[in-house]
Amino acid sequence: MSMKKKDIRALTKDQLRSFFEDSGDKAFRGNQVYEWLWSKGAHSFDDMTNISLATRQMLEENFVINHIRVDTMQRSKDGTIKNAVRLHDGLIVESVLIPTPSRTTACVSSQVGCSLDCKFCATARLKRMRNLNPDEIYDQVVAIDKESRLYHNRPLSNIVFMGMGEPLMNYNNVLKAIDKITSPEGLGMSPKRITVSTSGVPKMIKKMADDEVRFKLAVSLHSAIEDVRTSIMPFNENFPLSDLRESLEYWYSKTKSRITYEYVVWDKINDRKEDINALLEFCSYVPCKVNLIEYNPIDDGEFQQASNKAIDQYINVLESNGIVVNVRRSRGKDIDAACGQLANKS
Ligand code: SAH
């Protein structure tokens, strides 16, 4: 039986260079292969036409190139596209392309399933199977970029880590993927156009600040009252709001980058005056804006979107206190591509 071949895209450029040096070739060969793997998106060693046949065979014997495959693509009436993406081991994640007049945004997954237990999210019902590798995250973006050019005649402009999984629970791989996405050898995208969304893992938010990352941060807050938040996001018990607050203050002090709070208003859960006031107070801690997200029902009606009146109250109170509020309408609902609906249904 042959030894299990290694995924060549798990190697950094330096590791590839040393691999070639160690096998008696020039380190520069590593750069050439790296370019094939990342800028040119080669799917097989045979594609690497400026590499000698003998070297290609040697690579073939030692490595595999794992690529994701878009299994099914669904298109919504509103132009949203959802990909079900098959990974090399057969598991599936979903990613979404969201076009608006001014931008096209890729919403990508960071884990297969999710280990968190938000009561209102369909992904939470899939248990976490595994973390995605950097190349699996990167490939989702490349696939969406291709679709954006094909169906909307423009390249991808933004990326949000709001698909399946909790990006900060797969931090190292997310960071490596973002490095590839932003590097000139990858997609050359500006980190300012990338947003990592977290349910709020204080220790990791501080780590990101220490790493001086240049992408944006969004936090799925949904309630600024401890027991309300714990009732809908039970892991909040381990990461209390006071710790979250402290980590966000630290983030801002280091990065000077404004935070976005994502917030759904639900009927009889967080639609009271005191809920609004608690959010208002939370917003005073660090410069921020609030995205009010429309609720996408996932079940039997345990959660229901609050009335327009309640939502208007949120908007009025926040805006009259100088806080920027965006109301985010759902996109791609008809194909289960909206926030919280990703659950590998098909
Ligand atoms: N785990 C990360 C990334 C997932 S982002 C995070 O929690 O931020 C998905 C976003 O959609 C989060 O803001 C989440 O709170 C929100 N969401 C989850 N279920 C939803 C639903 N049914 N309707 C609307 N938004 C939902």
Image: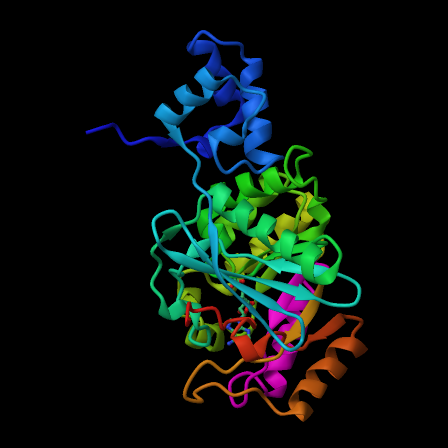
Position of 142 with respect to 257 (left or right) is: left
* Position in image of residue 296 (x %, y %): 54, 80
Q: Residue at x 36, y 51 (%)?
A: 130
How many labels were placed on the picture?
Answer: 0
> Quarter holding the C terminus?
bottom left
**Residue 199 visible here:** no
Q: Residue at x 58, y 14 (%)?
A: 28
* Position in image of residue 93 (x %, y %): 44, 59
In the image, residue 290 above or below residue 188: below
**Farthest residue toward the top?**
24
- Judge by depth and name the residue closer to the eye, 167 or 137: 137
**Residue 61 visible here:** yes
**Farthest residue toward the left?**
1
Which of the colour schemes (rainbow, by chain, secondary structure, one colour) is used? Answer: rainbow
In the image, residue 87 above or below residue 317: above
* Position in image of residue 98 (x %, y %): 65, 65
Stretch in magenta: 259-287
Position of 283 with respect to 178 (left or right) is: right
Q: Residue at x 40, y 63 (%)?
A: 116
In the image, residue 119 above or below residue 258: below
Position of 163 with respect to 64 (left or right) is: right
Residue 206 part of the magenta-drawn span: no
The part of the image, by quadrant, that contains residue 285 is: bottom right
The part of the image, by quadrant, that contains residue 322 is: bottom right
Residue 286 part of the magenta-drawn span: yes
- Judge by depth and name the residue closer to the eye, 63 or 275: 63
* Position in image of residue 18 (x %, y %): 48, 15
> Quarter holding the N terminus?
top left
The part of the image, by quadrant, that contains residue 51 is: top right
